[in-house]
Amino acid sequence: MENIFNKIYFKEDIIKQSDKIPEKMKIYLEKGKLLEKEWDDDNSKLNSRINDCINIDNNIKNIIEVNENIAKCNSQEISIKFIPEEEGQINEFLETIKAFGKVINDDKFKFKFQPGNNYNVTNNGLIATKNSGGNAWNCIVYGDKEIPKNEISKWKIKINTETSGFYDDLLVGIGPINAKGNLYSLCWSLVCSISKICIKGQKSEYNHLKGNLKKGDIIEVIVDRKLNNLSFSINGVNQGIACSQIPREDILYPTVVIYEQNHSIELI
């Protein structure tokens, strides 16, 4: 492919010659004038003068050809083809990419926390703090945008206050907009203070996690709604797939349930 590319479009020698064209033209014009004078002064070297004329003519043609090739290079649209070594290799490669779904860049799925009961929202919707209701599962915080279907979405949440470790202080995950604020109502979430996953009313050990999460820890939520799975990353370390039964068509939102009074979480 590289040989074809160089041959058709961008010959290295053409590019190198392009800067020399004005100077070469000047040289051959001066030679032409000198030849004309020598012809008048001495016509005994006829064959030599004829050869000089032919050389000048050839060099001028060469300059014209270089200019034409440069113009052709500049006007061409480059088309690169991938030629697989084996039949079906490209299709297999594309199917592998397709299986992972469409990855959304960080700037394509931005959301803020919606206002709600028993908490206040600050920092332009990026921080939610429980400010009423005491210690109870009565504070459920939603994002203001639905998680896109048939795509991969991800976001990060920072724990701004210490977890006690006695209660299930925070549940970070995804859920329907009408989930109730209790321990098992959120459909799929990470239970931060006891390092477990709450999945549709059942707690199950998340074997990759060790110990309670604490102030300053960052939880990344990764939702693949093409392969229907949910995974978490803790402080940059991916913990693997937490569950693989996320319904493809359900309307789901980023969700955090806060148990303890004055606890705070932040979108980053």
Image (cartoon, rainbow, N blue to C red):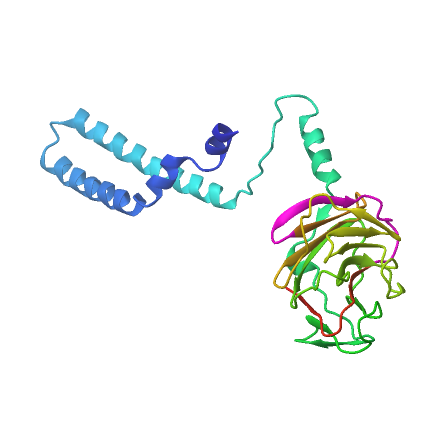
Residue 119 vs 215, above or below: the answer is below
The x and y percentages for residue 214 are: 65, 60
Residue 67 left/right relative to 241: left
Q: Which residues are magenta?
A: 234-252
Tell me the residue at 65%/68% (across/down): 160
Residue 108 vs 197, above or below: the answer is below
Residue 25 vs 262, above or below: the answer is above
Residue 260 vs 201, above or below: the answer is below
The x and y percentages for residue 192 are: 72, 57
Residue 42 inside the magenta-drawn segment: no
Q: Nearer the viewer, residue 230 or 195?
A: 195
Residue 36 left/right relative to 242: left
Count of picture labels? 0
Which quarter of the figure is the C terminus placed in?
bottom right
Q: Nearer the viewer, residue 91 or 19?
A: 91
Tell me the residue at 39%/37% (across/down): 65
Residue 243 inside the magenta-drawn segment: yes
Q: Nearer the viewer, residue 166 or 37?
A: 166
Residue 1 left/right relative to 198: left
User: In which image quadrant can residue 78 be found?
Assistant: top right
Tell me the residue at 45%/37% (across/down): 10
The x and y percentages for residue 126 are: 68, 70
User: In which image quadrant can residue 219 be found?
Assistant: bottom right
User: In which image quadrant can residue 91 be found?
Assistant: top right
The x and y percentages for residue 44 are: 11, 27
